Amino acid sequence: MSRPTRYVEHVMGLPISLALRGRHTDDAAARAAWVEVMGVLREVDRVFSTYRADSAISRLGRGEVGLEGCPPEVAEVLALGATAERESGGAFSVRLPAAGGGTVLDPSGVVKGWAVDRAAAPIRDLADTDFCLSAGGDLTCRTLDAAGAPWRIGVEDPADPGRVLAVVPVFTGAVATSGTTHRGQHLVDARTARPPSGVASVTVVAGSLTWADIDATAAYAHGPEAAHWLETRPGRSGLVVWDDGTTTVVAPVLQTADRHP
């Protein structure tokens, strides 16, 4: 099989990359789909960026507009956040503790996976074409031929990001990792307003990137209970890396990197 054709740009403060293999890789249809992908992600950034004072989510958080004054996708994201908060027992929330007390509206734990799932629509419309779309290392993939090669997704070692700790073979599905290696300590257990202890990273494999991303963050927030909580999630698999370097596999989906260089 020929090597995939790749596209890369930056938006939402992240590298966005697309790998295509099959009928449409470097033709007009593929390039048009890529333009649409980036257009969707730029619009998501305009609406949801917590770093932009003029974004809808920032204005909603400051009380300058109500939900009815925001684009309809804001309500969709907040509804996902409410479901995630309920199903995580409150460890995950889109309302995070603020430095001076109270809470701040920050749906970032929902938005990235949801946005990439949403942006992948024009690629899914490419006939006879496999794809792997990544945002900062969180990916959604499709393989049309069940006898074809899976996408092989590396899971980095949080203690040594240059080292691949494990490999996830994915035909069609999504992989997301939550941790603090690249962004520093920015994740908290919403129940305690404190960073969780004991856990270094959580990688989740699921049918959609929306829920892979949410559940990776929610499991991380559970700290010592990360693996136990993830085991309760239907259709999820994953890898929890603990602070001491040991790992726990949730369902046998991972292959060691040593056996697959």
Image (cartoon, rainbow, N blue to C red):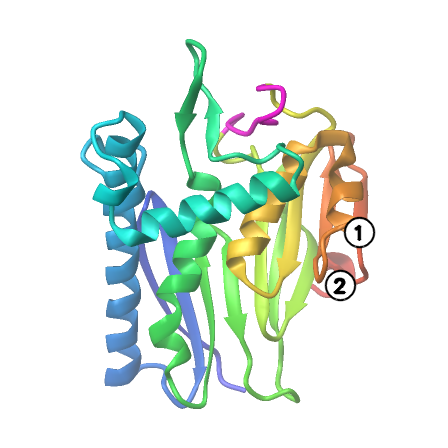
Q: Residues within 10 Å of mark 2 (few under 14, many from 20)?
A: some
**Magenta-colored span:** 184-193
Q: Say whether residue 236 is left or right of residue 56.
A: right
Disc on res. 154: none
Q: Identity of the amino acid at label 1?
A: Val
Q: Secondary structure at mark 1?
A: strand
Task: Say whether residue 51 is visible.
Answer: no
Where is mark 2, residue-wise?
Answer: 253
Where is mark 1, residue-wise?
Answer: 249
- The quadrant where residue 146 appears: bottom right
Q: Position of residue 45 (x, y in %)?
A: 28, 47
Would you say the magenta stretch is mainly helix, strand or loop?
loop
Q: How many marks?
A: 2
Q: Say whether residue 56 is left or right of residue 160.
A: left
Q: Secondary structure at mark 2?
A: loop
Which of these two is toward me, 13 or 59?
59
Q: Is residue 101 above or below residue 232?
A: above
- The quadrant where residue 17 appears: bottom left
The N terminus - image quarter: bottom right
Q: Real-space Cα distance between discs 1 and 2?
A: 8 Å
Marks 1 & 2, CB-CB < 8 Å contact? yes
Q: Residue at x 29, y 75 (%)?
A: 33
Q: Position of residue 217 (x, y in %)?
A: 59, 41
Q: Is residue 122 magenta?
A: no
Q: Identity of the amino acid at label 2?
A: Val
Q: Residue at x 45, y 90 (%)?
A: 128
Q: Is residue 11 above or below residue 28?
A: above
Which of these two is toward me, 241 or 224?
224
Q: Residue at x 30, y 56 (%)?
A: 41
Q: Position of residue 19 (x, y in %)?
A: 43, 71
